[in-house]
Each structure stands twice: as C-alpha cells, then as structure tokens.
Image (cartoon, rainbow, N blue to C red):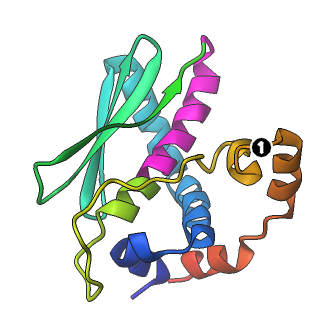
C-alpha cells in the first residue's frame, strides 16, 4: 500500500503536518483536474468531486463559492463547510479555486476515510479553522508577516517524498 493510499484510510488520524503535505501533493498531482473543475464550476455554477469515501458538491452564488460534503454510504450532509469569495479576474479565480478544491479534498479525506482497520466514529465534520492556502494558517490567525516567515521555514520535503513514492 502506498503512503497516499494509507492517508486515504487514516485521514482523521493524520497529523497536521501530514495533512498539509497531502494538500501540497494533491495540488501537484491534480493541478490539471482542478483547473478543469474550476472552469466547469465558473461556467455551470455547480461541480462535484468524490475522493476517499466522501463527496463534495461545490456551488457558486453571488460570487461566493461554497461546498457541502457527505459520505458515500451516508445521507447526512455537512452544508457549506467552507466558502471563498471570487474576484472579477478569471485567472485569479481559477488559482483560488484550485487551492480551495485541494483543501476540500483534505477535509473530505479527514472525515470520510476509506474502510480500514482503524475504527472511525461517526461524529461532526472537523476541519482546520484556517485553510492551508492562507497565511492565517501559518500565523495561527495572527500577524501575516509571521505567517510568511513560518511558511518559508516550513519543510514538508520528507512527507512529500513519501507521497510521491509508489
């Protein structure tokens, strides 16, 4: 089993550093897919994505993108888990949406893991307060300058190498 597959089965048990590296990995390997998804969302107003044992449904209303999530074997929805505001610039929106989709995938993997030997309890939808694509994540909601410094010092090379290795 690859490390990526292991992450899909142990999502909620992953450490913050592992989830952050997984976010970067998903951005890397799904860049083209996320780009197509972003264009579809902007053109049609709705798009969905299944990953691990869950599904996210993204929608746009009044320049605000939100997503709802649910487990594939469940009918319980977590409505409007995250949201972002779109700008007037199409290219900027596509970049923002790719990051938003990768963060959504991490949230889904964390909550709706693939069946495994790890016992999972059905409980609320837990997400990181600050998404990985913001400086607020690195500054823990504090000073953005500190966030930039911490982001530059962050080293995910070891975990990313494990994810890239089959």
Q: Where 85 sits versus 53, above or below?
A: above
Q: Which residue is mark 1?
A: 142
Image spot of residue 43 (x, y percent): 38, 18
Q: Where 72 sits versus 136, above or below?
A: below
Position of the N terminus by quadrant: bottom left
Which residue is located at x 48 percent, y 82 percent? 3
Image spot of residue 27 (x, y percent): 57, 53
Which residue is located at x 22 percent, y 65 percent? 122
Find numbered disc 1 in the image and state the secondary structure of the residue it sits on. Answer: loop
- Residue 121 within the segment the image draws in magenta: no
Q: Where 64 sits versus 140, above or below?
A: above
User: In the shown orientation, is residue 159 left or right of residue 145?
Assistant: left
Prevalent SS, magenta region: helix
What is the tally of numbered marks visible in this picture?
A: 1
Which quadrant holds residue 53?
A: bottom left
Which residue is located at x 40 percent, y 63 percent? 110
Image spot of residue 79 (x, y percent): 28, 37
Which quadrant holds residue 121?
A: bottom left
Which residue is located at x 20 percent, y 44 percent? 77
Which quadrant holds residue 145?
A: top right
Choose between 107 and 142: the one closer to the eye: 142
- Residue 97 within the segment the image draws in magenta: yes
User: What is the span of residues highlighted in magenta in the rendered image?
Assistant: 88-105
Image spot of residue 65 (x, y percent): 43, 26
Mark 1 burial class by Cα count in 10 Å: few <14, some 14-19, many 20+: few
User: In the shown orientation, is residue 156 left or right of residue 12?
Assistant: right
């Amino acid at each position: 089993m690859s490390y990526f597959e292991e992450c899909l089965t142990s999502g909620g048990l992953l450490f913050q550093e592992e989830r952050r590296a997984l976010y970067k990995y998903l951005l890397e390997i799904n860049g083209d897919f996320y780009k197509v998804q972003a264009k579809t969302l902007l053109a049609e107003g709705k798009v969905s994505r299944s990953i691990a044992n869950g599904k996210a449904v993204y929608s746009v209303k009044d320049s605000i993108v939100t997503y709802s999530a649910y487990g594939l074997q469940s009918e319980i929805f977590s409505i409007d888990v995250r949201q972002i505001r779109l700008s007037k610039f199409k290219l900027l929106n596509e970049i923002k949406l790719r990051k938003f989709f990768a963060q959504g995938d991490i949230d889904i993997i964390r909550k709706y893991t693939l069946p495994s030997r790890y016992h999972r309890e059905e409980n609320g939808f837990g997400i990181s307060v600050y998404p990985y694509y913001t400086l607020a994540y690195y500054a823990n909601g504090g000073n953005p300058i500190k966030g930039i410094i911490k982001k530059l010092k962050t080293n995910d090379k070891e975990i990313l190498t494990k994810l890239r290795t089959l």
